[in-house]
Amino acid sequence: MNERATLRLKTGRDRSLRRHHPWIMSGSVDRVLGDPQPGDTVVVVDEASRPMALASYSPHSSIRARVWAFDVQQSIDDGFVAARITAAAERRRHLGIADGDAVRLVFGEADGLPGLVADRYGSVVVFQITTVGIDRRRDAVVAALASLDGVHCVFERSDGDNRSREGLEPTTGVRHGSLPEPVWAHENGLRFHVDVEHGHKTGFYIDQRDSRRLVAEHSRDRAVLNVFGYTGSFSVAAARGGASSITTIDSSGPALLLAETNARANDVNIGDLVEADAFTELRSLRDRRASFDLIVLDPPKLANNPNQVDRATRAYKDLNLLALKLLRPGGLLFTYSCSGAVSSDLFQKVVAGAAVDANREAHIVRRLGQPADHPIPLHFPAADYLKGLMLLTLCRLDQEDVGYSWTSSMR
Ligand code: SAH
């Protein structure tokens, strides 16, 4: 190992680091002194060779290094990683996050652990490693997670595509204890089956906890449409909240089976399950003049990087336009983007454009986002990936009913 290699920044490229942003992009690096290997800890210095931070080196990634600590006297070892994990879990405990047992324990940079995510479902912790720096410390990660109160199983789900950028192979499996079957996420009096081995992310969308509660609160006697349903978690929440009817759309048959499992597990009826492409099905519902009182639009990440933002915004606009057309006056739209590359400003503009084209007026009655266990460091705004709007539609202008759309006539 070559722990003391140095990464020197170009002149004037130390500004974001001075504000404690934890990434050093390849374009900011003047030169690398020594011969650091992937995952080695390097000392980051400014143009005058003044030490600024200790960071983990990723020679194959455009994020060339990620900061472990701004105190350059710190030892970066297993004990350091274990202490950060314990502190992260402790913070969650003090936040008193959830009525339930599904909590994000570690959220990467927000917890000073770039490349590590860990979610807890009762006695099971599922973690994901995406960087070579933390990959080196896997044993310490497992031991620290296993030592948390009440944890009986630690499972690794390091199979995201982003690992290849760091030269890492996919790897999954039990790392401590044994995996109980089934695993459940308990939340606000509901429970959801967690497919730890194959489900999205670590098996469940913990990050929509607050929104599920809101949807439940607003579902009484409403006709609900849940688009991109996956686990059916929003449908189950709507059923528990007293929805008069529920329709769930997903293009994946297995996802709809999971939604059904979750409905049964909570002893609720979630109505119609429609296996279809959302874009096509929304158009067809529009053509059939269907209407709903509450719609949830929670698409998968449509932009994986800044190059995909244009295409993604077109898709977001299309979806929101169709959803707004399907809403009755006074209806509610819960609409989301989980694309980090799409800012909340941009997302709001896209939805506003969709409302104009749909000939609908709507108010933002709440802004929605990540819950408290997915905190956004002020110095690392990139952690702010989930943007949501709760919209109340005001009225339906009558032009559209005679087949006339002023927006299209103006183009
Ligand atoms: N709201 C969900 C999470 C959504 S994940 C929950 O509460 O669990 C995104 C879902 O969109 C996945 O289940 C995926 O199968 C589905 N999906 C992706 N592309 C789709 C498309 N074009 N049409 C319909 N569903 C799609």
Image (cartoon, rainbow, N blue to C red):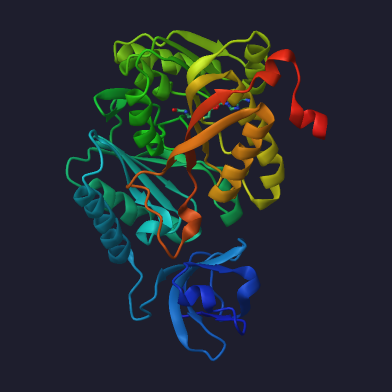
Is residue 265 visible to the viewer in this orientation of the structure? yes
Residue shown at 59% from the left, 66% from the top: 59
Q: Quadrant of residue 319?
A: top right
**Nearer-the-camera pick, 128 or 39:** 128
* Residue found at x 33% / y 47%: 373
Residue 60 occupies quadrant? bottom right
Q: Where's residue 189, x and y in %?
A: 24, 24
Q: Which residue of the protein is positioned furthest toward the bottom in this rendering?
A: 48
Residue 272 in picture, x, y percent from top left: 48, 8
Residue 144 vs residue 114, the one in the foreground: 114
Residue situated furthest front in the rendering: 398
Q: Is residue 219 left or right of residue 149?
A: right
Q: Quadrant of ligand 1?
A: top right
Q: Is residue 390 left or right of residue 104?
A: right
Q: Is residue 124 above or below residue 402?
A: below
Q: Residue at x 46, y 62 (%)?
A: 380
- What is the x, y in percent for residue 386? 48, 43
404 vs 285, nearest the viewer: 404
